[in-house]
Structures are given as structure tokens and as C-alpha cells.
Image (tube, rainbow, N blue to C red):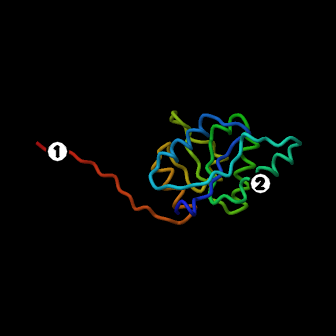
Amino acid sequence: MSQANPIRLFITHTWEMSDDYLRVFEYLESARNFFYKNYSTPDKPVTGDREALREDLRRQIAPAEAVIALPGLYDTQKDLLTFQLLYAQASKKPVILMKPFGIAKEPPKAILELATDVVQWDERALVDSIREHARQEKTGRWDTIEFKLD
């Protein structure tokens, strides 16, 4: 992965930029030496029937190397989120499911079963999961805790 060859991502959406959607990009932008291209376009809804919307989502997901799933969408648009995850799975795209933000609650079982990996809202965990599942890159990073004994 480099600036010339960024990881191609799709972040689930329901045709609007939710707080969680924007938060994903805050995490990705804060990661050092991590280059990505976003293929999700929630700000450009297609007019038309349900199938036209689904076709536009297929077009957005097709070039992605990984899909980042936001569980908060399940409460408001269960069918649309499930469609995106099923299409990603059928297209052999890894699905990285974020845990619900700010609450100690597990994601619904229906979407947990469609996930390749489930991560906390943590920049390092998200980036490591993307690298591992999109490009099979193991980071091998370790946490170091420094303390002083007296």
C-alpha cells in the first residue's frame, strides 16, 4: 500500500453521512502511512426505484477491496444495510464491522454473521484489520507500556 496504490474502501451508508460515517474518516485520516480511496458516495443518491438504488450500491462496492460496516444503520435501514453486506460477501469482499460507538452493546447477530472481522472504535484496530483483510498485510504491532518501579 502506498499513495500510488491506496486501499480501496467502501463504507456502508443509507444515502446520508451519519456521525459514524464521518467518524470512520477521522480515524483513517489520523493513521500514519495509511493511504485509501473511498468508493462510497452517500451524498449522491440515485433517483429511481429500489432496484436503481441497489444497482448504484453495487457499482460503489464493486471496486472496493474491503467494506467497513456501521451497525448503527441496522436500526434505521436494516434491509439496505443487509443488502450491502450480502453483496460484499457474494463479491468476496471482506466486511469489517465496527462495534456500536459509545455503548457496551454487541452488534445484531444478523450482521455479525456477515462480518469477516469485528473491531472496536480504535484507529489502530481499524487500520490493522483493513490491512490484514484487504491486502493480507500483518502489522505485527505490539503495545508497549512503560512504567517505573520504585
Mark 1, residue position: 148
Mark 2, residue position: 58
Q: Position of residue 22 (x, y in %)?
A: 59, 38
* Quarter the C terminus occupies: top left
- Marking on residue 21: none
Q: Are marks 2 and 1 in contact (CB under 8 Å)?
A: no
Name the side, left or right, on which 148 lies relative to 46.
left
User: What's the CA distance linking mark 2 and mark 1?
Assistant: 54 Å
Bin the neighbour count of mark 2 within 10 Å (Cα to Cα): few under 14, some 14-19, many 20 and up: some
Q: Position of residue 58 (x, y in %)?
A: 77, 54
| Front residue of this view, candidates 23 and 5 | 5
Tell which tag, 2 or 1, sits nearer the viewer. 2
| Front residue of this view, candidates 93 and 21 | 21
Q: Residue placed at 44% from the left, 52% from the top? A: 32
Q: Amino acid at mark 2?
A: Arg
Q: Position of residue 79 (x, y in %)?
A: 76, 43
Q: Position of residue 20 (x, y in %)?
A: 59, 37
